[in-house]
Image: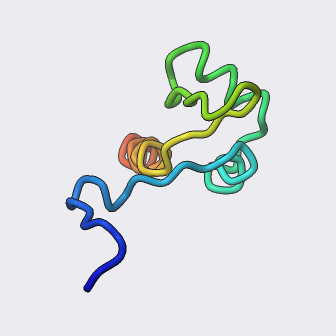
Amino acid sequence: MRLLPQLTSSQENLRLIRISAVMNLTGLPKSTIYLKMKNKQFPSQLQIGSRSVAWLESEIQEWILKNINQRDY
């Protein structure tokens, strides 16, 4: 008997990460992340508490892949 609910394949990649993890994954400083969000060049944050925000890890990974695919060789 399973105690945890079954996740669909689209739900398996749902993970919220905080700003420090976003900075580590992207290599961008916090100020650049917020500037890019303002300019609609970076995924938006989600409000997870009255004073807490997080990002979907899958959206950050998609943003990284998009930038890799757009680079010039």
Q: Residue at x 78, y 39 (%)?
A: 29
Answer with the quarter of the image where residue 53 lies: top right
> What is the count of numbered marks?
0
Residue 59 horizontal side relative to residue 11, left or right: right
Residue 73 horizontal side relative to residue 29, left or right: left
The residue nearer to you, when weighing 3 against 38, is: 3
Q: Name the quadrant of the N terminus.
A: bottom left
Q: Residue at x 70, y 55 (%)?
A: 24
- Residue 4's place in the image compared with 26, above or below, is below
- Which residue is farthest left? 8
Residue 42 horizontal side relative to residue 51, left or right: left
The residue nearer to you, when weighing 67 against 40, is: 40
Answer with the quarter of the image where residue 12 lies: bottom left
The residue nearer to you, when weighing 22 against 5, is: 5
Q: Position of residue 15 (x, y in %)?
A: 48, 54
Colour option used:
rainbow
- Residue 29's place in the image compared with 51, above or below, is below
Q: Residue at x 59, y 22 (%)?
A: 37
- Which residue is farthest top? 39
Q: Residue at x 37, y 58 (%)?
A: 13
- Residue 64's place in the image compared with 36, above or below, is below
Q: Position of residue 8 (x, y in %)?
A: 21, 59
Q: Position of residue 4 (x, y in %)?
A: 35, 71
The residue nearer to you, when weighing 54 against 65, is: 54
Residue 51 horizontal side relative to residue 61, left or right: right
- Residue 33's place in the image compared with 63, above or below, is above
Q: Position of residue 10 (x, y in %)?
A: 24, 53
